[in-house]
Image (spheres, grey):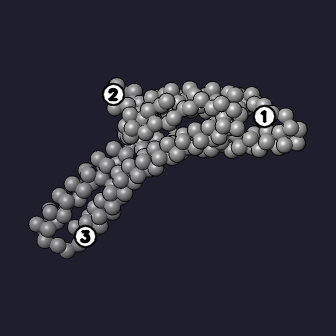
Amino acid sequence: MATDTKSHETIDMPVPTNPESEYAWLVKTLQQYIDKNMKEANKYSKLDRLVSIPSIIITCVSGIAAVIATHDVSDQAQNMIGISVGIMASISTMLQSMSKGYNFSAKADKFRKLSEEFTTYQNTLVGEMRSANETQTNTGKPIEYSNYIKKLKKHIEILGSINTFSDTGNRDETPQKKYISEQLAVANMLSVTR
């Protein structure tokens, strides 16, 4: 059972007893990973907008104020506008630096990519399920697992053991980076095994 220590959500990993419940468990587990990764992608997209939109607005207002300062206004007004433009430019630069430093959009893209990878695996699994059900219906033989399904189950169990997003540890090696790299490694292994 994997625990997300930040949001206290868990992804249950029951042990299915037959092929039908195993398929259902795999589909459900993949859906949980899809949802979890999309939730993180949306969170980082919102953070990116939260930092970049004010920066855009401040830059626009600063530019308008600079144009106003060039027209016929008193010296005192020009000084105040000049100081205001400088302050707004500094704030805008700080917000842009934060946006670039935290790289929220890249994090959102990575989580979105992971979600798309898990969606691909889920779609492949559903196709395998349909094929197995048609084979069972036509031949009357019990459902047999393909190698893809066996390896997919193994890698999902590995993913389930990953503890994600803990607030402890060295800030240079963030848990988010570790989580993303581990999920990408597993996704790449799944691609090779297909």
As helix, strand or loop, the secondary structure at mark 2 comes to loop
C-alpha separation, residue under disc 3 versus residue under disc 1: 76 Å
At a point 34% along the width and 32% down the height, the residue shown is 167
Tag 2: amino acid: Thr
Q: Position of residue 26 (x, y in %)?
A: 63, 37
Q: Position of residue 74 (x, y in %)?
A: 13, 71
Q: Which residue is mark 3?
A: 68
Relative depth, front residue between 94 and 124: 124
Q: Which mark is residue 143?
A: 1
At a point 25% along the width and 66% down the height, the residue shown is 65
Disc 3 versus disc 1: nearer the observer: 1
Q: Which residue is mark 2?
A: 168
In terms of sequence position, does the residue under pointer 3 or pointer 1 come before the other?
A: 3
Residue 15 as seen in the image, left or right of residue 43 = right
Tag 3: amino acid: Ile
Q: Position of residue 83 (x, y in %)?
A: 17, 58
